[in-house]
Amino acid sequence: MNYHNYTKEELLKLVEELIQELQTKKYGLVWDKEREPEQVVVDCQDNLPILKEVKTKHIKTDNSDDNILIEGDNYHALSVLNYTHENKIDVIYIDPPYNTGENDFKYNDKYVEKENKYRHSKWLNFMEKRLNLAQKILNDTGVIIVHIDEHEVHNLQLLLTNIFGANNSLGTIIWNKKNPKGDSQGVSIMHEYILCFAKNKEKFLELENPLKRAKPNAQKILNKASQLYRKLGKTLIPDDVKEVIKPFDYEKNVLKDFEVTYTLELINKEFQNWLSRQDFSGGEKAYKFIDNNGRVYRGVSMAWPNKKKAPNDYFIPLIHPVTKKPCPIPERGWRNPPSTMQILFDNDLILFGKDETKQPERKYLLEDNMFENTTSLYENASSDDEFFKDLNIHFPYPKPVDVAKYFLSTIHPNAKIICDFVAGSGTTGQAVLELNQTDELQRQFILCTNDENEICTGILYPRLKQVIDGYSKRDGEDTKGIQANLKYFKAQLLPKSRSYYQTKISLTNECTQMLCIKENIYNLEIQKEDYKIFASNDKSKYLAVYYNTLNSGLKEFLRELKKIKEEKIVYMFSDTDTVNQTIFKGIKDFRVEAIPQKILDVYKELNKQNISPQTNTIFVDLEKAKRRIFIENDKDDGASKLRIVLEQIIEHIAYKNGLNLNDFNAIARVNTKLKDDGVFTKVRWKEIETYLTIGNDASHGDYGNYEMKQVKEFYTFVQNLITEFGIGK
């Protein structure tokens, strides 16, 4: 920034602001949040994000749930999803701009160059606002998975910790791409980071098998064991011997000398010899035995795992099945109670030695332990370049589908709704479709991206369409499509009216697609001037929307609802946030919600969280209060207006100090938090508390609780607070 054009007063004011920041900022992630506000965020002050369906891009192949593609700025898309999908998303999986300084990240429609002094601040501004919105759409067991490289990984770790909390971190996975960067000026980097956070780690870990992955070679081991076990009792030449003698071309009568009759012992030797030559993990190679039933197993200690001794009945000795003598007991007792030990014995899941001198072990069957903990290391050097050539789509450096499938299946065990709000070429969408072919989960994806350089209309959408419809490879081979449905929407902004009531009417008329997305019901059955009725793909649920501000078409609307026997979700225009339930007498199996107040409330909270309070409104309202107090001698309206100004000042100071205003349900609590953080002194906190009370009394008509003298002191206090915290016009 060029300071040469600043006046002396402007420079002094800037210095005061910097001093204030240094005095109030705490340890952690600190950056310049509002040097250059992001326009797409500021636009939401005077406009309401909505969605419009592009019906010509609808893809439908069956009656399964529709997947969603939103074209537009992801801030606007996430704003809509905060209404339609609040607390609904299982997994957010994103690969955001890495901010390398090489034309990969735009802020306010301009690429952020490597030399830009506020490069990292702009990236953090961009990410923080979207992650704030993303956190709200995750359900209580939901997780966010974020790809990043060395340029912003440390900032991102702190930012995610700030938003989700350190206690909700699930860890970081290193993706070894096995392809070192050739342009490195130092150590050649060939890995990326995948940061994982839960919305509520405690609840996430209550899911069945979280953070588990299939053992990479387990099935291969089982297949080999099955092949060898089928040789039991047969007289054959061992496979290893065949390889050795193959070049010599022996006659058949000579080959008989190499034949052996397979016993279980020989099968195990050949199995273990094969395992020793494989590039498997130590954990996989530990499963090196085949039992009498052809099952692959390993031995595991059955000793009590804690430092303190087990209860007395955990010291009952196991009797050797052959020698009939007791076997050694672990020093601190058995891991399991006698009842469990008996079950293990009855199911041949206890391993005894040749005699009673060896301590028995638990038999762990590989078929019952096909999964292992997801580790912090992942290796994948694959590329989807050839796939894109087959589609005749050019896109540099696409993330491999196999990588996305791995992370979507090894962190959250049963994710149903997956959102990628930095969708790029659509890898997440394809990964979800392919995963749906492997199990019964039937996942649904929501993808958001802008259309810069036609990335949505020219790359992402054509890719998904070919994956769903099928395509021909360059060699002429046909690839069968994956059955799925896709709805295509565009994010738009609806200007607010000067009349709040008119804004409500406008939003009611434009929110239909949002309601369809919210309820996952899209098929238009009845369309009238006053209402519309939609059906789900399987006709099990219906969505009814009544738009009329009057009751002229209400009777007809209610008659149509009575005809529908299935579940009904009804949305009706209301000037408040409630609907008169008595009008639905005789209608069964329904629920009703008012529109559009809840949508407006959601957007108001998002603006409060992500847009810095405007200082110009503080001074406009302060002038109004000054006129009421000093010219018109109206102490009551003056005090009421001063409270509004004081609240705006507190919100402004809180925002500057990194507080999320949505975490507080009263301005008094924000005041206390600023005191606890050392921003306000105890004296200043108490003064604010006193003046908030005066303003509150004025607002509620308790005019006898204060005098004009106190109101004038209130005005002086507000002026001093503005000066102290450098709040400029």
Image: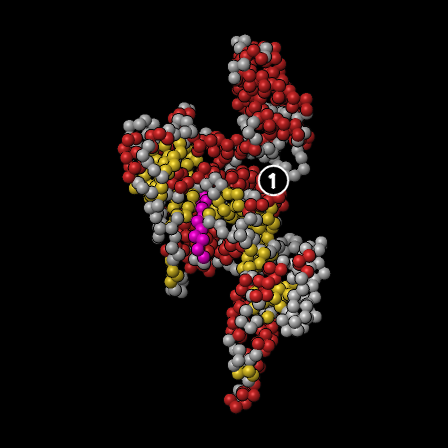
Characterize the local packing of mark 1: few (<14), some (14-19) or many (20 or more) Cα atoms within 10 angstroms.
Answer: some
Q: Give the image location of residue 367, x and y in percent.
A: 53, 64
Q: Which quadrant does the C terminus fall into?
A: top right
Point 63% across, 58% down: residue: 336
550 or 181, nearer to the observer: 550
Does the rendering let one see residue 72? yes
Point 52% across, 65% down: residue: 219
Does the rendering let one see residue 155? no
Q: Amino acid at mark 1?
A: Asn
Q: Is residue 346 left or right of residue 15?
A: left
723 or 170, nearer to the observer: 170
488 or 32, nearer to the observer: 488
- Looking at the picture, does residue 707 appear above or below residue 81? above
Q: Give the image location of residue 393, x and y in percent.
A: 43, 54
Point 39% across, 38% down: residue: 515
Residue range in magenta is: 439-454
Q: Give the image location of residue 133, x and y in percent.
A: 51, 39
* Magenta stretch holds residue 165: no
- Looking at the picture, does residue 477 appear above or below residue 721? below
User: Where does label 1 land, which residue?
Assistant: 162
* Magenta stretch holds residue 451: yes
Q: Is residue 59 left or right of residue 397?
A: left
Point 41% across, 40% down: residue: 518
Q: Which quadrant does the N terminus fall into?
A: top right
- Looking at the picture, does residue 263 appear above or below residue 90? below
